[in-house]
Amino acid sequence: MAFISTNDFRKGLFIEIDNEPYLLVENQFVKPGKGQAFSRVRFKSLTTGNILERTLKSGEKVLLADVEEHSMQYLYSDGESWTFMNTQTYEQTGLTKTQVEEALPFLVEETVCSVVFFKGKAISVTLPNFMVFEIIYTEPGFKGDTSGNITKPAQIVTGATIQVPLFIEAGEKVRIDTRTNGSYVERVKA
Amino acid sequence: MRNNFFSTSNLENLKTRSLLLKNLRIFFEAKGYLEVETPLLSHFPSIDLHIEPFTTFSANNEEFFLQTSPEFAMKRLLACGFGSIFQVCKAFRNGEFGNLHNPEFTIVEWYKPGFSHFELMAEISELFTKLLQTKPAKFTSYKEAFETHLKINPFLCSTEDLQNLAKQKLTTLPNLENSKDDWLNFLLTEFVEKKLGVEQPEFLYNYPSSQAALSKINGGFAERFELYVDGIELCNGFHELTDAKEQAKRFELENQKRESQGKRVLPKDTRFLQALEFGIPACSGVALGFDRLVLLALKTKNIKETLTFSFENA
């Protein structure tokens, strides 16, 4: 059994509480005046979707869920279940909305993702760190903008909105980082 | 990643920050304070159970500490007879990183010889009416705050009473063992802080003597205060301890607590102790988290929006 300290907490960790898998969705560092520091954490149950709020003493440890990851391709969704296929065995597996929620802004068909299994059951999915998307819509930027803003919103095919530099135009492709809510990495030349 | 050069702030926020700093200096000049600068890098750190300094080594392999607060150096200046002083500087606290914390942050700290902590609080209230256009502050004792928001007397209750209260309110509790101060701090953080300073800035004062830090203890209370605005802690101040022997004892006690928790025992600032032995004037002093002040002025939720580059982006 492996444990992890609050000092190493980050979004996306899989935690086991009372034999059930949870996803760490929020971790806030709090410290009153000159006192002991705490981590105010939100865990999402990957079976019920319920949120569990806990305040832990800084440095306290929790049990890491013993998970396995398999490379699987996203096929389709009927709105209730999201179907993934193992690219080697062709075996298919369905995930619930609760389980795919965090990936939805950037999940597109045919993407090869990492599906996470706990005690033999699929519980979650992790996107590739970097993905390329075409910009569907963005306001034209202009040189010499003096507002101090160097980014603008842009819409991609999934409907998600990301921030891109002013010089990016609709129709261009950009590489984004899925771990940081789709932050812009670079322009991808066709 | 190629977009890593972006600022975590923006032009409008930085203009607000710059203006606040300017107005702050105008205020201190009008009140007769001298602006000073003391070393960020020092032979000695502050000694607190819950504050970890960054350390580094000089070319001849001597250990140095990045200051966690300019307190000791400024008190040495008080012993030199330099009178009312203020400083705007960087301070560093290892491991403190979150929505309201950046390990490198900006402190405004000032000392006023002859002032009680109540007189200093009145001056801080005036500063906030000028900087944030707030109403004058209200004053709530530590005891009143616990009685109002938790229906418990923090001085008369036992550690067990505090644990039981926490158990009634929460299904799982942090692993705090038997430290009464830790339980008080936990309950303060979870149930009291967010209700402080909502209508107007609110001072919490008369702390338990076990949480005196570097304040005088009088009639069983620590002459220490904190200021809250919109549930956020902004200032920590003291009617300053001026007794060298008592200070040395507190260093010793704090180091014992550190050792019992497996933390490093830190060297005692002998120059600061010499200054106290020589004598510093009776005074009050306070530290203000400048980044949090900017955060409140901007009504944002994350301190990184007040910083050109936050710690993860530095």
Image (cartoon, rainbow, N blue to C red):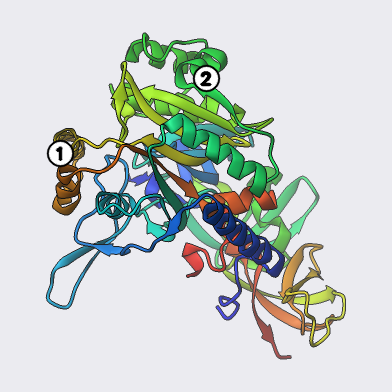
- In the foreground, A72 or A141: A141
Q: Is residue B42 visible?
A: yes
As drawn, the residue found furthest toward the bottom would be A190
- The three-letter code of the residue at mark 1 reads Ala
Residue A155 against residue A56 in the figure, above or below: below
Residue positioned 44% across, 36% down in the render: A32
Residue positioned 61% across, 31% down in the render: B137
Q: Residues within 10 Å of mark 1 (few under 14, many from 20)?
A: some
Q: What whole-number distance in Å separates the C-alpha atoms at marks 1 and 2?
A: 31 Å
- The three-letter code of the residue at mark 2 reads Ala
Count of numbered marks: 2
Q: Chain of mark 2?
A: B
**Which residue was labeled with disc 2?**
B145
Residue A85, given in percent of the width and then of the height, sits at 63, 61
Q: Chain of mark 1?
A: B
Residue B134, given in percent of the width and then of the height, sits at 68, 39
The answer to which image quadrant residue B238 occupies is top left
Side (left or right) of A45 relative to B178: right
Q: Is residue A119 visible?
A: no
Side (left or right) of B182 relative to B247: right
Side (left or right) of A63 relative to B134: left
Side (left or right) of A41 relative to A155: left
Residue positioned 32% across, 30% down in the render: B212
Residue B135 against residue A130 in the figure, above or below: above
Quadrant location of the N terminus of chain A? top left
**Which residue was labeled with disc 1?**
B248
Q: Are marks 1 and 2 in contact (CB under 8 Å)?
A: no
Residue B164, given in percent of the width and then of the height, sits at 42, 12
Q: Are marks 1 and 2 on the same chain?
A: yes
